[in-house]
Image (cartoon, rainbow, N blue to C red):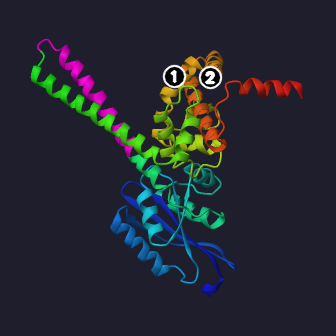
Amino acid sequence: MMTNIVKQVVGIDIAQTELVVSLGRMNHDTGIDIFAFKTFANNAIGFKDLLAWVNKLAAKEIRVRYVMEATGVYHEKLAYYLSDQGQEVSIVLPNKISNYFRTLDVKTITDKTASQAICRFGLERKLEIWQKPKKIFKDLKQLTRERDQLIADRVVLKNQLHAEKAEAFPNESSIKRVTKRIQLIDKQELEIRAELAAIVKQDTELVKKIDTITTIPGVGKLTAVIVLAETNGFELIKSKKQLVSYSGMDIRLKDSGTSVKGKPRISKKGNRHLRKAMYMPALAAMRFNEHHKTVFVRLVSKHGIKMKAAVAVQRKILELIYVIYKTDKAFDKDYVKKQTAEVQNS
């Protein structure tokens, strides 16, 4: 009897072009049963087909929850579509699924087993229903990513211009055209900055948040905007550890067999835009902030790897942005000293 069903979940493993889907249910008598599987296109037609397939197979008297990972931008259109259709959606940080996957007795990782794991995770856990992020964060993300692409294009053009000028017989027409393209990008980048400022100005609460975040040495308004845009105002983030994992700056240690250990490396499996945004602030912080400079020097003296130490500083600044956003307390350069003094006096 279908009345024994207490929960129904669609687990979706999302790639750029396809959705790998598992449909499961939790039953009072028999426990968890993942009973259907199918692949759909990651586009408007695929979304419609997915909904029709689920409506055909799922029990009508129990609401269905659609569960997916926060996979860059590939999950966003589906999440918006399902929400607009009145469906319940839960979006989970990738590290939660990967950690859960390790607890399962799965020999081979495939798109199918991944969707089954997401489905099982949704059935076993009590997940929050996803709410659409504020439109302002969506708009800011689109603009900051457009700017990022423009900057990348400009670097390529500047290298091309340098190479052309270094020729024994430079082509003046080529130099002129490349120079014009660089000037156009310069103009467009200024336009985007102006648009970003205008959008932020519309939200007085966001203005205050950004002003507080930029009290951190090395963190400018653009960095603050990028971080808030890429995290939707830290919508899914519940802790510093989750944020670090979402950015891909968490440490992964590879083991080979039982005796050979690989070098610790950052996972790079998270949001590359967040990692990129932390690069320049970390350089500035290591020069002008005594605490971060000390962290950098200590880590370099410990293992001799400057890049690893720089990433640690980037990670600390990202965590600091999160804490300041949540607490609304400005950066205190004497915070560490005060903490140390409190411990010594207690």
- The stretch in magenta equals 143-169
Q: Residue furthest right?
A: 346
Q: Secondary structure at mark 1?
A: helix
Q: Nearer the viewer, residue 209 or 60?
A: 209
Q: Quadrant of residue 173?
A: top left
- Circle 2: residue type: His
| Kind of residue at badge 1 | Leu
Earlier-in-chain disc, 1 versus 2:
1
| Residue 16 visible in the shown view | yes
**Of helix, strand and loop, which mostly describes the magenta segment?**
helix
Q: Please tell me whether mark 2 sits on a helix, a strand or a loop.
A: helix
Q: Which residue is mark 2?
A: 292
Label tally: 2
User: Which residue is outermost to the top?
Assistant: 168
Q: In what quadrant of the picture does the C terminus appear? A: top right
Residue placed most toward the observer, 1 or 308? 308
Q: Residue at x 67, y 28 (%)?
A: 332
Q: Residue at x 84, y 28 (%)?
A: 343
Please say if 292 is above or below 206.
above
Can residue 305 be seen in this snapshot?
no
Q: Residues within 10 Å of mark 2 (few under 14, many from 20)?
A: many
- In the depicted structure, whether residue 319 falls above or below residue 29: above
Report which residue position mark 1 lands on: 283
| Quadrant location of the N terminus in the rendered image | bottom right
